[in-house]
Image (spheres, grey):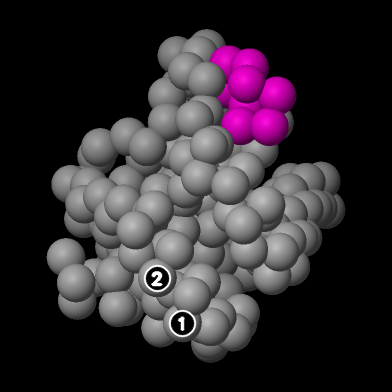
Amino acid sequence: MQRVFDRFINSLTESFPLNEEEILFLKKSIPIKKLKRGEYLLVEGEISKSFFYNISGFVRLFYLSDGEERTAFFYPEGKFIGAYDSFRNQKPSNFFFQAVEDTEVAIFNYEVAEKMLVVHPNFEKLARLVMEEELMNLQEMVSSLITLSPEKRYVQLMQKNPGIFNKVPQIQIASYIGVKPESLSRIKKRVHNHL
């Protein structure tokens, strides 16, 4: 687990410098969890007790609508993952977080997150960065759903996460861009013919 923790710290410090004392606090307070493909970080109706940092792997956010899974977002490694409304207000989540491949996450539970802000004020900057990232993710979700065609959503996904197509099942990619799997095949063919 030391190697995984080191990868977590190295990844985190790329965008947020930490001193030795802060790294030691994280080492003592933040557990690392390994998830197998298909395992859940959060299920609908559950109150989120933690937010996560994706060290390796892919996680998807999806909703159930009329018994059908609707993928809304993918979190690649190096991203924070959180159901912030559920986490902050301690109310049930209305969506799921699921590992779409074997994944390793750092877990920031509610009590540790609160303590971080009191004991190490520098973590307030990190909390702000996490919230800004989540706001940008939400704006991207809404914007792409409202303004982009499925084909353009596919191209955007390809540009932002080129490795995703080797890791995520086609049915989940189809769900994300808002089409049936057979339509995804036609979109892929059209897009790749124009490249």
Label 2, label 1: how many angstroms apart (C-alpha)? 6 Å
- Residue 130, relative to residue 89: is it above or below? below
* Cβ–Cβ under 8 Å for marks 2 and 1: yes
x%, y% of residue 44?
Answer: 48, 20
Name the residue located 69 percent from the left edge and 70 percent from the top edge.
Answer: 122
Name the residue located 29 percent from the left edge and 70 percent from the top edge.
Answer: 5
Name the residue located 42 percent from the left edge and 63 percent from the top edge.
Answer: 26
Q: Amino acid at mark 1?
A: Glu
- The one of 12 and 164 positioned closer to us in this rendering: 12
Disc on res. 90 = none
- Residue 153, relative to residue 68: is it above or below? below
Residue underneath mark 1 = 20
- The one of 193 and 88 positioned closer to us in this rendering: 88
Q: Secondary structure at mark 2?
A: helix
Question: In the visual, does 189 lie left or right of 91?
Answer: left
Q: Secondary structure at mark 1?
A: helix
Q: Examine the structure image and report whether residue 92 is included in the region drawn in magenta.
A: yes
Question: In the visual, does 131 lie left or right of 36?
Answer: right
x%, y% of residue 191?
Answer: 54, 73
Q: Badge 2: few (under 14), some or many (20 or more) residues near its Cα, within 10 Å?
A: few
Q: Examine the structure image and report whether residue 61 is included in the region drawn in magenta.
A: no
Q: Quadrant of the N terminus?
A: bottom left
Residues shaded magenta: 86-93
Residue underneath mark 2 = 24
x%, y% of residue 183?
Answer: 47, 47
Q: Amino acid at mark 2?
A: Leu
